[in-house]
């Protein structure tokens, strides 16, 4: 049996199918089956999808700037992005290191946004449950000093032991900082690909 780290290395990016496209064959996230979109001519276009009207040009994520094309849902106080895979971070727009430093309005908006994102992802991926996870501080596994909630669709049997999801979150949290520092992910995912994925997610909230 493959170890958890070996399984995670095989995990494909979390994506959404176009609204009118037929569902593609499922692929594994651990043992969780997530539906991926069929290849389309629009995804191979050399032009990037435009930033949605009303969205900011870029977003702060700790010391990093996140291109607005990676953001698929935004409120006055929070945003959700496709930058990290296979987990989706939901973040406050203001740069806040620790959960306790959020204002009451930011706390409420962050969780409402995470709930809305989770509802859409669970329905789309035909999942049956959700995991919401926060690593609050470096000793809790936080690598980027900016509060964020991981939203993870779940299905029965996706992990042999349920607590393995938290080990997986720790692994991906470390990989997130490496990707942001070294631009690792863009070697196999271009900005155009991530922008196309974000547009597909964004359609769920239109």
Image (spheres, grey):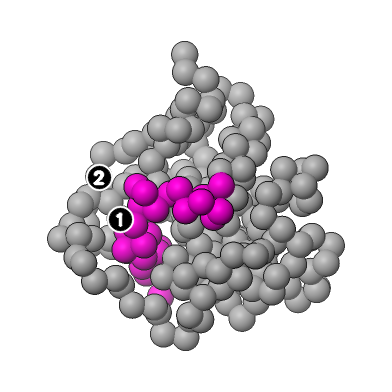
**Is residue 4 magenta-colored?**
no
Q: Residues within 10 Å of mark 2 (few under 14, many from 20)?
A: few
Q: Where are the magenta residues, as a range?
A: 178-206
Q: How crowded is mark 1: few (under 14 residues within 10 Å), some or many (20 or more)?
A: some
* Displayed quadrant of residue 173: top right
Where is residue 12 drawn, in percent x and y? 38, 41
> In the displayed structure, would residue 182 be above or below residue 141?
below
> In the displayed structure, would residue 148 be above or below residue 79?
above
Where is residue 61 drawn, in percent x and y? 62, 65
Q: Could you tell me if the residues under marks 1 and 2 are in contact, i.e. CB atoms within 8 Å?
A: yes
Q: In this view, does 102 lie to the left or right of 83?
A: right
Q: Which residue lies at the image location 20% right of the left edge and 60% below the top edge?
A: 44
Q: Indicate the secondary structure of the residue bearing disc 1.
A: loop
Q: Which residue lies at the image location 51% right of the left edge and 51% below the top edge?
A: 182
Q: What residue sits right under mark 2 in the picture?
A: 24
Q: Indicate the secondary structure of the residue bearing disc 2.
A: loop
Where is residue 33 drawn, in percent x and y? 40, 37
Q: Which residue lies at the image location 60% right of the left edge and 37% below the top edge?
A: 171
Quadrant containing the C terminus is bottom left
Where is residue 24 drawn, in percent x and y? 25, 45
> In the displayed structure, would residue 111 be above or below residue 13?
below
Q: What residue sits right under mark 1 in the picture?
A: 17
Cα–Cα gap, marks 1 and 2? 8 Å
Helix, strand or loop: magenta stretch:
helix
Q: In this view, does 38 lie to the left or right of 105?
A: left
């Amino acid at each position: 049996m493959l170890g958890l780290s070996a399984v995670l290395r095989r995990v494909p990016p979390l994506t959404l199918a176009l609204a009118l496209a037929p569902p593609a064959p499922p692929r594994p996230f651990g043992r969780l089956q997530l539906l991926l979109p069929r290849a389309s001519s629009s995804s191979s276009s050399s032009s990037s999808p435009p930033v949605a009207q009303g969205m900011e040009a870029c977003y702060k994520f700790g010391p990093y700037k996140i291109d607005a094309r990676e953001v698929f849902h935004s409120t006055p106080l929070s945003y959700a992005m496709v930058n990290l895979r296979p987990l989706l971070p939901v973040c406050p727009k203001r740069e806040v290191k620790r959960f306790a430093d959020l204002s009451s309005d930011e706390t409420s908006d962050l969780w409402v946004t995470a709930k809305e994102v989770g509802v859409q992802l669970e329905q789309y991926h035909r999942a049956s449950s959700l995991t919401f996870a926060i690593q609050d501080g470096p000793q809790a596994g936080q690598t980027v000093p900016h509060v964020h909630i991981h939203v993870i669709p779940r299905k029965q049997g996706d992990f042999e032991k349920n607590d393995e999801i938290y080990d997986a979150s720790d692994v991906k949290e470390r990989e997130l900082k490496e990707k942001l520092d070294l631009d690792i992910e863009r070697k196999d995912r271009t900005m155009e690909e991530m922008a196309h994925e974000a547009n597909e997610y964004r359609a769920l909230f239109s």
